[in-house]
Image: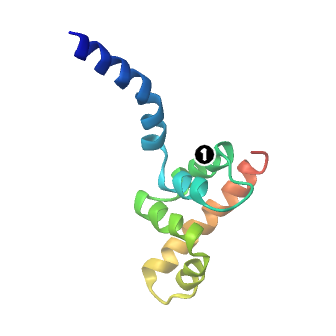
Amino acid sequence: MKYMTILAILVALSTPIFSTFVEAGPITRACLQSDRKAANRSLCNCIQKAANTHLSRGDQRLAATFFKNPHKAQEIRQSDRRSHETFWKKYRAFGSTAETYCRRS
């Protein structure tokens, strides 16, 4: 009985920590892990919300890689692949939305 009580307390205490990380999308995680000075939870969550409106989950994973490797964004933008062109159009719309709505964060 004592073991179950301790286990229940540990689960209750750790749930908020883990649920926050699990709920965070790929953009939020990449933003928070970046070395950018302006990155904070509020801003990164706002950017994630903009991503949710314009980008699929796969598109978000690709966009998240740009935080560590900005040159990859340039490669995608200049690519001749139709899928990259489609992604880039959605990415630009996402960027405009994020810039407009997250400026205050």
Q: In this view, does 88 lie above or below 41?
A: below
Which one is nearer the viewer's eye here, 9 or 61? 9
x and y percentages locating residue 14 in the rendered image: 42, 29
In the picture as drawn, the residue positioned furthest to the top comes out as: 1
In the picture as drawn, the residue positioned furthest to the front comes out as: 2
Quarter holding the C terminus is top right
x and y percentages locating residue 76 in the rendered image: 53, 81
Q: How crowded is mark 1: few (under 14 residues within 10 Å), some or many (20 or more)?
A: many
Q: In this view, does 46 lie to the left or right of 75?
A: right
x and y percentages locating residue 61 in the rendered image: 45, 63
Q: Is mark 1 on a helix, strand or loop?
A: helix
In the picture as drawn, the residue positioned furthest to the left comes out as: 1
Q: To which quarter of the image does residue 15 belong? A: top left
Q: In this view, does 14 lie above or below 73?
A: above
In the picture as drawn, the residue positioned furthest to the bottom comes out as: 80
Residue type of the residue flagged with mark 1: Asn
Quarter holding the N terminus is top left
Residue at the image point whose x is 45% and y is 41% from the top = 23
Q: Mark 1 points at which residue?
A: 45
x and y percentages locating residue 58 in the rendered image: 41, 63
Q: Is residue 73 left or right of residue 99?
A: left
Q: Is residue 42 left or right of residue 5?
A: right
- Name the colouring of the figure: rainbow
Count of residue discs: 1
